[in-house]
Image: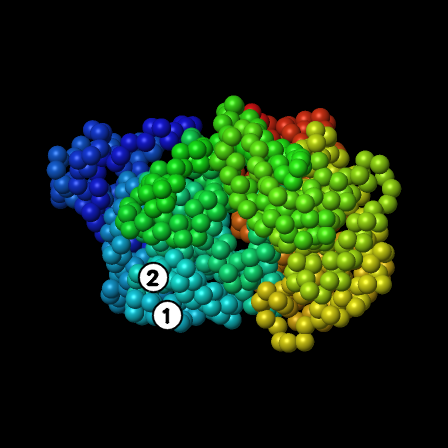
Amino acid sequence: PQTIFLSNYMAPGWHVESVNLTFKLAPEATRVISRIAFTPNPDAPAQPFMLHGEELTLISAAIDGVAVSPDLTAAGLTCDVPDGAFIWEAEVEIAPVKNTALEGLYMSNGMYCTQCEAEGFRKITYYPDRPDVMGVFTVRIESDLPVLLSNGNATASGAGWAEWHDPWPKPAYLFALVAGDLVAHNDSFTTMEGRDVELNIWVRAADLDKCAFGMGALKRSMVWDEQVYGRAYDLDIFNIVAVDDFNMGAMENKGLNIFNSSAVLAKQSTSTDADFQRVEAIIAHEYFHNWTGNRITCRDWFQLCLKEGLTVFRDQSFTGDLHGHAVKRIEDALVMRNRQFQEDAGPLAHPVRPESFVEINNFYTVTVYEKGAELVGMLKRLVGDDGYRAALDLYFTRHDGQAATIEDWLAAFTDATDRDLTQFKRWYAQAGTPRLTVTDDFKNGTYSLHIAQQTPDTPGQTDKLPLHIPVAVGLLDDTGAEVVATTLLELTEAQQTFTFDGLASKPVPSILRDFSAPVIIERDVTQAEQAFLLTHDTDPFNRWDAGRSLARAVLLDMIANGGDLDAGYINGLRAALTDSTLDPAMRALLLAMPSEADMAIALAGQGQTPDPDAIHQTRRKAQRQLAEALATDIPAVLSSVRIDAPFAPDADQGGRRALSNSLLSLLTWADKGTAAQAQFDTADNMTQQLSALSILLAHGAGDAAAQAFYDQWHHDRLVLNKWFGVQISAAQPQDAVAVATRLTQHPDFEWKNPNRFRSVIGALTGNQAGFHRADGAGYDFVADWLIKLDPVNPQTTARMVAGFDSMRRWDDARREKMRSALTRIKDTPGLSRDTSEMVTRLLS
Ligand code: DPP
Ligand code: ZN
């Protein structure tokens, strides 16, 4: 397979002025007729005329009305073309019903839908399928299905056909088409520019009662983008369609967003608070792409973070504005530390802007998305709120209608704010998580912080240069009073000293407030100092982080030396738990012990080899002892957070439910499931029902509840995914593979559906001690299923093979078993390009 390099970028030889497409839909034999107006690009180097195309049957082709016979290649076609502008016409045949990869035009439950990002359009017709070729699309759909949708505005329709016109030039990856027997949840919105917009969420009739929340989220997103970024919607209609079979979360096609049904449908009885929050965030994310992604797109796929990092940053800010920034920042930092830092430390590490790829689908990663968002957040900290807004305004003005690069993005910041970002740009090119080693001293009223930075080697990259890192710091005195408020230090050298004068005594530093940069802080801190910060820090993120660090230290100490849960830690948690001035959501976060993965990462970071069983057993023991220690405190806290109002999926109630479910989990150690069973039996919402089921299963008392849950919900595909997943996530390590095996034999295990596949295979890779069973049964089970899925759906297979990326962390025996499972995948005849690139990187 061919490797593509950023450094080989070449401008396209031809522009597309306009595209007319006609679709004659049929499951086995859809005809796609295209008419494309090409003009030569005077700024491009000379190159042959080439159109991408895969898995197409060419019926006919013509240039300026004269039939031609192009040369067909594996990647598309080449053809002699006239010197100036010309009209290309072609007719191809495709078979949507056979398309199980879910890229291009495919069918899901009898409906036609598309997924073209990144390179799916070439499976629909011959086209220059690259994001820097932007054309105006007009689409005619012919089908007997009642609802026929494409991008832009509806222009005409009749019995069995509809036409759509999108006035905004766009790359092919934003093309979309839907045809199905659908109904709409309808609403409207008037933009700040006075445009009346029709809003629809299209679903199957049975799902119509799950659309109201998503519609509200859409309208909140539209208002927020007007108020915070000054960006209004630009078409007369905005359609969202829910699809059951979908590889990713959702897709921002111009005016016709297509969503994995799990990312748009929500209602009280079937959706957890986390589901509601995820639906709102993804709807916002896709909507925000209309400006950051669609109006300004990417020049090439190496620039993916240009739209994704920025749009994730925007959706995170939106969620923070609506529901509170402190909790949101902690949640986002957890994703960075538990997932992105792990990716950045392993064989799959890559820069936020990669320099090469074999299959671009393998780079829709937590590094491009979430670390990409952190880079935007750091830029905002460095230039300030006003500078950020000025830079974004300039970016939109300058690049509207263009396919841009990271260079363009940074130039907008430099030109709007006069900041030199030459060094900051290294963040886009250097992979790996920087480690900041911090020491301090105090002399004659002057406090000095010495910070050294170092970024470890990553695959293909050694000798990293110093980065420009914003480090937010505050100083507290020994009474807990803040003697220096949050100050942004700019670390640019390999080693640097920052001083603070005029202090009466040596302060306690609070470093990396608000998680101001995606880095690891290494500093010798006593447990007493962590306990002090847990009580006194005025920065909510660092207060939580002090508690988290303390918990980690205590648990690691128990793993190394045995013994009981530390009394100081218990007292700190009791103080936080019973502090009624603390938001319940924050108390729930404080109470949550570091995950098993977090502890494995911490041990590996100390140069030790983690034992997944010891981690699991110790964590369970710690929870049991915490439950005993807090037993008398729990009832009063539970009644103080009881909800008397009707259900609402809002932050206040969500926080109360999160805290009460943490406490229910603790209570279950003593009552053996009485309270959890009662909550299961009477729950009127999915958060309460699923938490109770999960707790019962984790305590070995969930069989009856699991059966009852199935009987109640087997007709609902999204809830059934939870039923599959929770039995594996909550299983004890020795049982997890057996439970997963049994579930794959269940008649409802529709393994070709990505959500269902992930709910079983993904749940097992997420059960650390279960997946990493010493005998390798977990690895073999997952490898068998990935080998089976690969020919059907390469993209989802490749994504899930990343579950092996912790390989280096474990003991030799486990590592060898992981290697041999991966080697077995690698040696499978006919392995897809997607999976083979991933396995090769994992094994290298
Ligand atoms: N562009 C899509 C998104 O992130 C890909 N799933 O929103
Ligand atoms: Zn996105």
Q: Is residue 556 above or below residue 679?
A: above
- Residue 633, percent from left and from top: 82, 63
Residue toward you, 609 or 173: 609
Confirm or reject: label 2 Cβ below 8 Å from ligand 1: no
Residues 321 and 712: in front is 321
The residue positioned 57% from the left and 33% from the top of the image is: 497
**Labelled disc at residue 344:** none
Name the residue beneath numbered marker 2: 233
Q: Residue at x 41, y 28 (%)?
A: 3
Residue 224 figure quarter: bottom left
- Looking at the rendered structure, the kind of residue marked 2 is Tyr
Residue 618 located left or right of residue 712: right
Q: Position of residue 384 (x, y in %)?
A: 44, 49
Figure quadrant of residue 148: bottom left
State whether residue 118 appears in this view: no
Picture coordinates of residue 422, whole percent (x, y): 40, 34
Dividing the picture into quadrants, the one containing residue 774 is top right
- How many residues crowd around disc 2 within 10 Å: few (fewer than 14), some, or many (20 or more)? many
Q: Position of residue 684 (x, y in %)?
A: 66, 71
Q: Residue furthest top?
A: 463
Give the residue displayed 69% in from the left and 42% down from the top.
506
In the displayed structure, does residue 735 sit left or right of residue 157? right
Q: Secondary structure at mark 2?
A: loop
Q: Which residue is mark 1?
A: 189
Query: Would you place residue 709 above or below residue 568 in this image?
Result: below
Give left or right: position of 695 versus 189: right
Q: Nearer the viewer, residue 82 or 197?
A: 197
Amino acid type for the residue under numbered disc 1: Phe
Of 836 and 390, the residue lying toward us: 390
Q: Secondary structure at mark 1?
A: strand
